[in-house]
Amino acid sequence: MIRLYHVPLSPFCRKVRLVLAEKKLDVDLVEERYWEREADFLRRNPAGQVPVIKIDGLTLAESNAITEYLEETHPEPALLPGAPAERAEVRRLVGWFDDKFHAEVTSKLLYERVNKKITKSGYPDSGNVKAGAKAIKFHLDYLGWLLEERRWLAGNAMTVADFAAAAHLSCLDYISDVDWNRNEGVRDWYAKIKSRPAFRSVLADQVPGFPPAAHYADLDF
């Protein structure tokens, strides 16, 4: 049995969950209160971060290391293209979301509105929230530009880049922080990806004290 230590509204955990589900790998989900820094968890990952996965007798941490391992050990269905240039574009976009989007949007909106309350680490910073609300417009426009010439974000096939983007956006959609009317192409892409069976467990997430937006699990918005 594969065991994944995760937090429901972590985009990094969601990316791994989506890859596992797309590859039809059964997983035991263990919610981890990583901010409490318990000794057992720190032994699994001294960095004190999720996700952490136990698989094939190994304990692996860091979402990209995990998804690359899953791709190499369970290559079907493929979530990385075969050509080096195409793989580079996928990895660029994964980096875009896990670094740039995370720093400019996810950390400013989700972490301020939700994580601070859950971890009892203070109150939302209104300046950060405003900055995140402004930055997400740029990112949605960029996604719309990509999708003008592509069926999926990195090309004509769905890849882990789509799951990285959808992981972040789904977390923000949970708290109704995505303006899906801003770009029709982005809205259609997200409707397509969240209709996949791999998305079912993500759409079933419930965080105590934070009910999801009314449209969150609606496949037709």
Image (spheres, grey):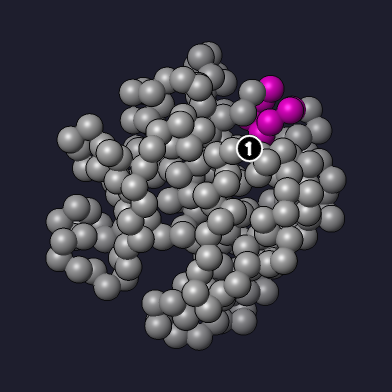
Q: Is residue 130 visible?
A: yes
Q: Can residue 95 be seen in the rendering of this structure?
A: no
Q: Which quarter of the rendering shows the N terminus?
A: top left
Q: Which residues are magenta?
A: 150-156
Q: Position of residue 70 (x, y in %)?
A: 37, 30
Residue name at image x 65 percent, y 44 percent = 194
Q: Position of residue 114 (x, y in %)?
A: 52, 74
Q: Residue at x 17, y 35 (%)?
A: 57
- The C terminus sits in image quarter: bottom right
Q: What kind of element bears circle 1? A: loop
Identify which residue is drawn at 35% across, 38% down.
66
The residue at 62%/63% (across/down) is 174
Q: Position of residue 126 (x, y in %)?
A: 62, 82
Q: Which residue is mark 1?
A: 196
Most distant residue in the top direction = 83
Where residue 58 sits, quadrant-wise, is top left
Give the residue type at disc 1: Arg
**Residue 152 is inside the magenta segment:** yes
On screen, 21 above or below 178?
above
Q: Nearer the viewer, residue 209 or 71?
A: 209
How packed is label 1: few (under 14 Cα within 10 Å), some, or many (20 or more)?
Answer: few
Q: In terms of secondary structure, what is the magenta stretch mainly?
A: loop
Give 153 or 139, whichever is nearer the viewer: 153
